[in-house]
Image: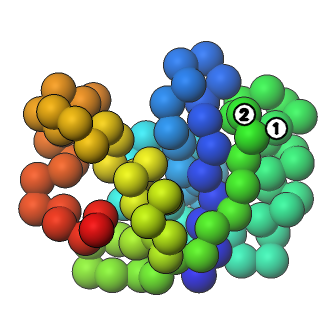
Amino acid sequence: MKILTGNDLKSGAVVWWDGQNWSLHIADAADAGDEGEAIMAREESARRVNAPYAIAAEQTEDGPRPAHIKDRVRALGPTVRQDLGYKAAEQRGWDWVI
């Protein structure tokens, strides 16, 4: 499974391609398949996302799980004082980062 990630151009927030648009929540991420390069080029040129890239992931019961630790950390937000991050509610029960 390949999913797309990048940063929202306006806010800088980590975003995930959901098949139609960009979402703040990795649980919404969709498999980009063979269309990943075309989607990233189109979205970056439309200035909706900054520096998009494709990552390997596996589908779990809770949604996609990035294969690499760097992207797991990006998916959940800050690793210090997680209760203050904008994704705090999403982090509960997600112990798969490390």
The image quarter containing residue 93 is bottom left
Asked if labels 1 and 2 touch by Cβ distance under 8 angstroms, the answer is yes
Residue 70 vertical placement versus 80 (above, below) = below
**Classed neighbour count for the residue bearing mark 1: other residues with Cα under 10 Å, few (<14), some (14–19), many (≥20):** some
Does residue 42 sit above or below 26 in this rendering?
above
Q: Which quadrant: the C terminus?
A: bottom left
User: In the rendered structure, which disc, 2 or 1, sits on the residue that comes first in sequence?
Assistant: 1
Residue 76 appears at what percent x and percent y?
32, 49
Answer with left or right where residue 7 lies relative to residue 59: right
Residue, disc 2: 50
Q: Position of residue 97 (x, y in %)?
A: 29, 64
Q: CA distance from mark 2 to mark 1?
A: 6 Å
Which residue is painted at 53% across and 19% down in the image?
11
* Residue placed under numbered mark 1 in the picture: 44
Q: Amino acid at mark 2?
A: Asn
Q: Nearer the viewer, residue 52 or 19?
A: 52
| Number of marks in the rendered image | 2
* Quarter of image, res 49: top right
- Does dot 1 land on a helix, a strand or a loop? helix
Which residue corresponds to the image point at 44% horizontal and 65% vertical from the top-left?
A: 69
